[in-house]
Amino acid sequence: MFVRFLPFVFLLVFGGNTLARQNPALFEIPIDCKFGNNCDLVLFVDHDKSAKWKDFQCGSLSYNNHQGTDIRLRSIKLMQRGVDVLAAADGRVIKIRRGLPDISFRAIGHDIIVRRGLGNVVVLDHGNGWRTIYAHLKNASIRVATGQEVKAGNILGQVGMSGLSEFPHLHFAVQHQGKVVDPFSPEKTDKKRCAIKQKTLWSAKAKAQLRYKKAFVLQAGFSDSAKFNRVALTYGLDIKDRMERRSPNFVFAIEFGGGRTGDEYEMSLISPGAKILARSKKKITRITNIKFDFVGRKGYGRVWPKGTYKGRFELFRTEQGIRRKVLETERIIQVP
């Protein structure tokens, strides 16, 4: 989510050591989902003041001037079914915006939606200058009213993809005295602090679930479309649970997070008998957070042999001269 010129959002400024002493009751998880199962912690507050970005661990899981924490659902179907957004702490509703559709901003146009970038939103006041923002809520899902008092865990609405969004997710932001605060690292981050344990604004229960991952798989699957893309994967379009013997194409696609400049990754499509049908080796040459790619083979009228096919993805990172595999996943599909 990319946000500018929003009425609820202030300049990116981090508090100092006094901030940690002024925080309210620690925050609970603001969404009712299972991390690593049907949702993922994908993007964090940007701690870099330049045109580049870095998260609180000096990784790439942010983007320029990103001012919150993004928790993403793994499918559109989950959003349609309904996933509740919860108050992270006791507070009072002070702002609400409704009425925006749940659709990728690319279908509407960036310039049209930018001034409503947060989409459908609820803002809570927690006293002593503390506020939390719950953005991109599902249209017609908001259950609270302006002025209403809420308790931690109360339902505010549901996860959507309204505003400047490409996928269903909750954008959760924390502010103190009008300044952005990263709940994972309320004190200013620098390179010397990235590798050490930091104080957070999360409760012990929340912190146990909100684990930072250097790299992770968001989605992966097979298709027979030569024009398969990220949007199709997100919406579950042309995703196959089995491939036909005369499928025109055989494609394995993946969306992953946490790749860093200089990382290398390999994608392979493997037929029964461990024969490599297609393989791709690439290097990440510029900073990225979430990346989509695919590998595949055209059918050219062939009949695919029966059996089990595999799609394999491997991500490698070189640190201090040592090349290590930091992420690996494999998916299988049958040709009956």
Image: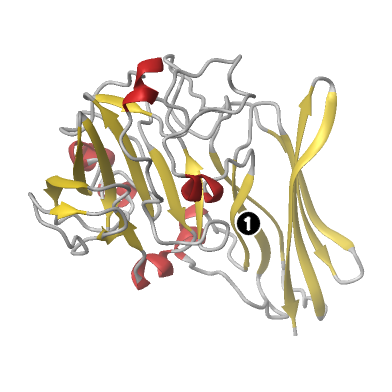
Q: Amino acid at mark 1?
A: Ala
Residue toward you, 22 or 284: 22
Q: Residues within 10 Å of mark 1 (few under 14, many from 20)?
A: many
Q: Is residue 159 visible?
A: no
Instruction: Tell me: 100 left or right of 154.
Output: left
Residue toward you, 94 or 23: 23
Horizontal and vertical percent for residue 225?
Answer: 58, 65
Residue at the image position 57 percent from the left and 57 percent from the top:
36
Instruction: Tell me: 219 left or right of 203.
Output: right
Which residue is at the far bottom?
336
Residue at the image position 82 percent from the left and 79 percent from the top:
307
Relative vertical location of residue 313 with respect to residue 143 in this rendering, above or below: above
Numbered disc 1: secondary structure? strand
Relative vertical location of residue 323 with respect to residue 84 in this rendering, above or below: above
Q: Tell me the residue that label 1 is attached to.
A: 253
Task: Place residue 14 in its image quadrant.
Answer: top left
Relative vertical location of residue 81 with respect to residue 166 in this rendering, above or below: below
Residue at the image position 74 percent from the left and 78 percent from the top:
334
Residue toward you, 242 or 58: 58
Task: Place residue 333 in its image quadrant.
Answer: bottom right
Residue at the image position 58 percent from the left and 40 percent from the top:
212
Task: Place residue 174 in its image quadrant.
Answer: top left
Relative vertical location of residue 28 with respect to residue 322 in this rendering, above or below: below
- From the image, which quarter does the C terminus lie in? bottom right
- From the image, which quarter does the N terminus lie in? top left
Horizontal and vertical percent for residue 188?
Answer: 45, 18
